[in-house]
Image: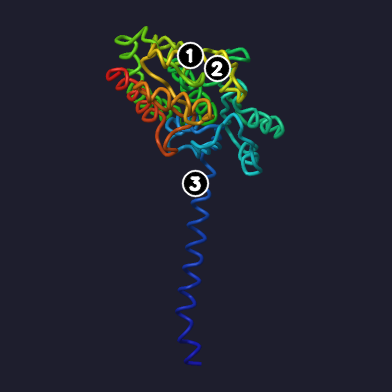
């Protein structure tokens, strides 16, 4: 009997800890369930949404690996389930993430707010899909995301608006660099291995002279015309360009050879990616690092 009494207190303590742990887990799950579930096909849109939503949202970005080509990605079961349960779904559109759009259409979830960037920008199909590299588009999109979150949680309107104001100030960090390049280097001839730089190049007034047929072919994953490759090589060998933009996520033997050719001709090379690098970066810091590298290369070229 005395032995039995000796174990009663430890057993009671053990049971108390189990109940306490269960209660804490329950409380945590309840708090999570009160948050807005945001799913973004790509981490650059997801990061912007997360900064606006703050501690009121749970954000899941499907594509986060900078070694993955978003054009060729195929969703898995967990991706599809997340999309089905999303309160706010953000896709890029323009053929960039058809897998996410198909999953959304298959889910038939009428309660999901579906934010297709292509649609809100009123862009026709067939446009350059790298919409996040256009700072004007980014400023429009963050406003729409904020309005969607306010629609879902009106009581948090002021919170979302404060976060938006803070984000816009932070976005100026890289947009000011772009404006500086436009002011001091507008008209400078550059080249790009892929069409990813079309939007920022146009915004900054840089003259991208690499053949469109080459850049678009690489973007679409097909072999470019031989004539376009020869033109590109001549532009490098003649040092007609002052900078080569190199898409680090659509590397082919042809683009690698052009990169090596630029190195031999002492032409500065700036690598840019289609998803945030590193994945835990913020959108504005990622953009700043890339455009600051462009500026340094133009200054030293």
Quarter of the image that includes the C terminus: top left
Residue 296 located left or right of residue 102: left
| Mark identifier at residue 144 | none
- Label 3, on which residue? 31
Q: CA distance from mark 1 to mark 3?
A: 52 Å
Q: Residues within 10 Å of mark 3 (few under 14, many from 20)?
A: few
**Picture coordinates of residue 100, whole percent (x, y):** 63, 31
Which residue is pictured at 48% across the width and 82% down the height?
8
Q: Compute the Cα span from label 2 to label 3.
A: 51 Å
Which residue is farthest top?
187
Residue under label 2: 214
Tell me whether circle 1 and circle 3 mark residues in contact (CB < 8 Å): no
In contact (CB < 8 Å): disc 2 and disc 1: yes
Tag 2, which secondary structure? helix
Above/below status of 179 relative to 46? above
Residue identifier under label 1: 210
- Label 2 crowd (10 A; few <14 / some 14-19 / many >=20): many
């Amino acid at each position: 009997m005395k032995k039995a009494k000796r174990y009663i207190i430890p057993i009671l303590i053990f049971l108390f800890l189990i109940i306490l742990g269960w209660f804490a887990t329950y409380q945590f799950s309840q708090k999570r369930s009160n948050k807005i579930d945001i799913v973004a096909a790509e981490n650059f849109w997801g990061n912007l949404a997360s900064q606006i939503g703050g501690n009121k949202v749970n954000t899941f970005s499907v594509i986060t690996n900078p070694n993955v080509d978003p054009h060729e990605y195929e969703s898995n079961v967990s991706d599809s389930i997340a999309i089905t349960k999303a309160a706010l779904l953000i896709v890029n559109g323009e053929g960039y993430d058809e897998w996410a759009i198909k999953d959304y259409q298959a889910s038939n979830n009428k309660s999901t707010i579906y934010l297709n960037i292509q649609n809100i920008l009123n862009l026709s199909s067939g446009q350059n899909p790298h919409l996040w590299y256009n700072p004007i588009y980014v400023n429009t999109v963050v406003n729409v995301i904020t309005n969607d979150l306010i629609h879902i949680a009106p009581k948090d309107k002021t919170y979302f608006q404060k976060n938006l104001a803070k984000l816009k100030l932070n976005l100026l960090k890289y947009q000011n660099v772009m404006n500086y390049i436009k002011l001091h280097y507008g008209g400078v001839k550059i080249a790009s291995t892929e069409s990813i730089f079309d939007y920022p190049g146009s915004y900054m007034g840089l003259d991208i002279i690499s053949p469109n047929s080459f850049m678009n072919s690489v973007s679409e994953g097909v072999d470019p015309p031989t004539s376009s490759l020869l033109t590109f090589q001549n532009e490098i060998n003649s040092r007609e360009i002052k900078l080569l933009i190199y898409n680090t996520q659509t590397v082919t033997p042809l683009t690698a050879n052009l990169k090596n050719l630029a190195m031999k001709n002492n032409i500065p090379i700036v690598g840019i990616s289609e998803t945030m690098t590193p994945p835990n970066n913020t959108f504005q810091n990622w953009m700043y690092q890339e455009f600051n590298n462009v500026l340094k290369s133009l200054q030293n070229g």
